[in-house]
Amino acid sequence: MINFVVSTLENVIPTEKNGMVKSEIIDLIQQLKAKDINFCVATSKNYDAVKDIFGPVKADIVYICNEGGVVIHHDKVISKTPVDRLVCYEVSSEFEDMLDYDVVFSGERNAVVTRQSSFLMQKLRNMGIEPEILNSTKDMSGEITKVTIFAKKGLSEEDFAKYYGRWENKAHFSATNEQEAFLTGEYVSKGTALAVVQQVYDISEEDTVVFGNGFSDIEMFDHSFYSYALQSADAQVKNSAKHITEDIKTIMEDIIRM
């Protein structure tokens, strides 16, 4: 019996122009809750940039944030795994003089940049993130749970392989698309975070539905019996899911009817 619905946020959950989740999805989440079916959102963003867009249901949702680096429910941290601070320093140093790349360091609720660019600042604001600006990564306080590398011209397969090889033994390196790569704590991903949530709340994979659209969602598919990729997803993502759907709304309605 399905009792847990998990969806990536980016390019899956529809939002209004003001960034708020569409009312029809809010209504469906409320209907799921009424049937004792919990809803979880998985995102690359930090908690403070996400929770308010769910309006009246924000307190009922489980949040897998920062690509799995932080899990929060009822405003309490359920799980948090930081990135090694030395890795943060290495990443900052690697891209310090490369103007085609921007780097953002994310805590459970905040984001930090050490170099401003109009491209980066506009992109972050479009995502609902207002970063703290510091002179150096050494000035960062608190734990960093995700490092995002924005590649203006895209990451080639050779670039991805190079950076993966450089940090694979120190952190988990993944990508959502050609322009965004992530480092989280070693062995940390949306998939491992989902497994933690299932263990904490005694939820089985057989009772879990997952919706995904990006490469970093594939690992969540491994922890659900019902996995859906959106029709708009990359071929590799669709091949990794058991089912394809045009949108999340239709399947959520089917779950409620069931």
Image: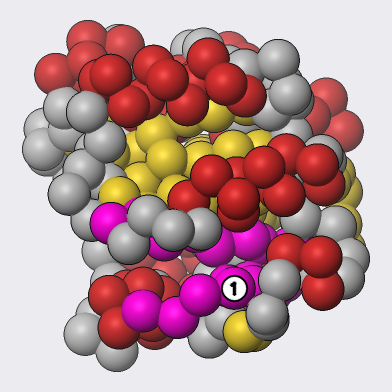
For label 1, the residue is 114
Q: Give the amino acid at mark 1.
A: Thr
Q: Nearer the viewer, residue 38 or 11?
A: 11
Point 58% across, 72% down: residue: 113
* Position above or below: 39 against 201: below
Point 70% across, 15% down: residue: 169
| Mark 1 neighbour class, 10 Å CA radius: few under 14, some 14 to 19, many 20 or more | many
Residue 25 is situated, as x and y percent measured from the top left of the image, at: 35, 64
SS type, badge 1: loop
* Position above or below: 228 against 254: above
Point 17% across, 49% down: residue: 153
* Position above or below: 256 against 163: below
Q: Is residue 48 left or right of residue 77?
A: left
The magenta segment: 100-117
Residue 232 is situated, as x and y percent measured from the top left of the image, at: 11, 38
Across the whole image, how many numbered discs are drawn on residues?
1
Q: Is residue 204 visible?
A: no
* Position above or below: 229 against 93: above
Residue 143 is situated, as x and y percent measured from the top left of the image, at: 85, 57
Q: Quadrant of residue 246?
A: top left
Q: Is residue 111 visible?
A: yes
Point 65% across, 62% down: residue: 106
Asked which colour scheme the image uses, the reply is secondary structure
